Image (cartoon, rainbow, N blue to C red):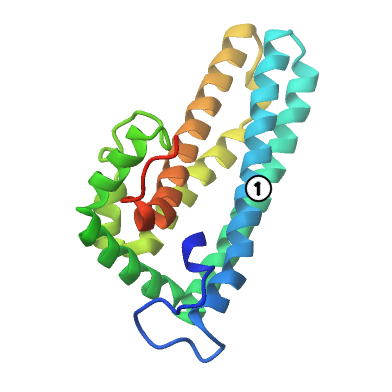
Amino acid sequence: MALICNVGTVEPEGPAPPPSGSWQSTYAENEKYIEFGSAYFAQAYAEALAMVSDIELHDPSRAKLRIATAARLVEHSIHQYQLSAEMDSRTGLTDHHTELLRTEAERAGGFSTVLSAAQSRTLLPAQDFDRSGIGPTFATAGYAGLMTLYVGRVEAIHNHLRSDLTDLRDGVAWQEFAWTLMALFTDAAAIGQAIAVLNTFMFRIHEPATT
């Protein structure tokens, strides 16, 4: 979740800490699920990119192995995000974090301002994040909605990786499979990165640029 909320000695303002302990310790416990989920996602993305190389080298057998490996990694990623969501619901962390983000967004001039500032510092790719639904999703469903939006993109990747590969009978079919997979990964990664920016960069948007 928000690394900025996992460090420091001052408890974030907001509702009282959960019975299980401080908000800071709850953040730290939840963070391991997000970190593992992101790590599995990154590994799957790497396998997908290597699969493109296999296709270019006309090695479908190795490409199929990469696809199977990426599919399992994405499964592990989704499972970790599910564990995070379960903990969020159990502890009330999502509601607490949502309020922190809402407050900070108002101070920073809104989500679009934060994302635009991040893009100007090359912390995000140059694309229209308003069209991705990040702002409207947060407005209606909070941080849980953002994570649902992201995990939905990851699930779409998993579904594509589980496609019937017997349909890939020629180079054109393999190309189109790869293009779709890359588009899905790129979309999910951009949304995930935008959420990470909202979690961290928003809290230091007024610091001098370091890039």
Residue drawn at (66%, 38%) of the image: 44
Task: Looking at the picture, tell me which residue is in the foreground, 22 or 142.
Answer: 22
Tell me if residue 13 comes above or below residue 57 in the rendering: below
* Quadrant showing the C terminus: top left
Residue drawn at (31%, 43%) of the image: 115
Left or right of 211 on screen, residue 73: right
Left or right of 182 on screen, residue 39: right
Q: Residues within 10 Å of mark 1 (few under 14, many from 20)?
A: some
Quarter of the image for residue 122 reads top left
Looking at the picture, which amino acid does disc 1 mark?
Answer: Ala
Left or right of 38 on screen, residue 108: left
Task: Tell which residue pokes out farthest to the bottom in this image.
Answer: 19
> On the image, numbered disc 1 is attached to which residue?
39
Task: Looking at the picture, tell me which residue is in the foreground, 73 or 210.
Answer: 210
Tell me if residue 156 comes above or below residue 20 in the rendering: above
Q: How many badges with numbers are in the image?
A: 1
Residue 141 place in picture, x, y as percent: 30, 62
Residue drawn at (63%, 40%) of the image: 42
> In the rendered image, is residue 130 in sight?
yes
Residue 53 place in picture, x, y as percent: 69, 15
Task: Looking at the picture, tell me which residue is in the foreground, 133 or 201.
Answer: 201
> In the rendered image, is residue 2 in sight?
no
Residue drawn at (40%, 51%) of the image: 201
Tell me if residue 102 comes above or below residue 131 in the rendering: below
Left or right of 175 on screen, residue 129: left
Task: Looking at the picture, tell me which residue is in the foreground, 110 or 138.
Answer: 110
Quarter of the image for residue 144 reads bottom left
Task: Tell which residue pokes out farthest to the front in this image.
Answer: 208
Q: Secondary structure at mark 1?
A: helix
Residue 189 place in picture, x, y as percent: 49, 39
Residue 106 place in picture, x, y as percent: 21, 61
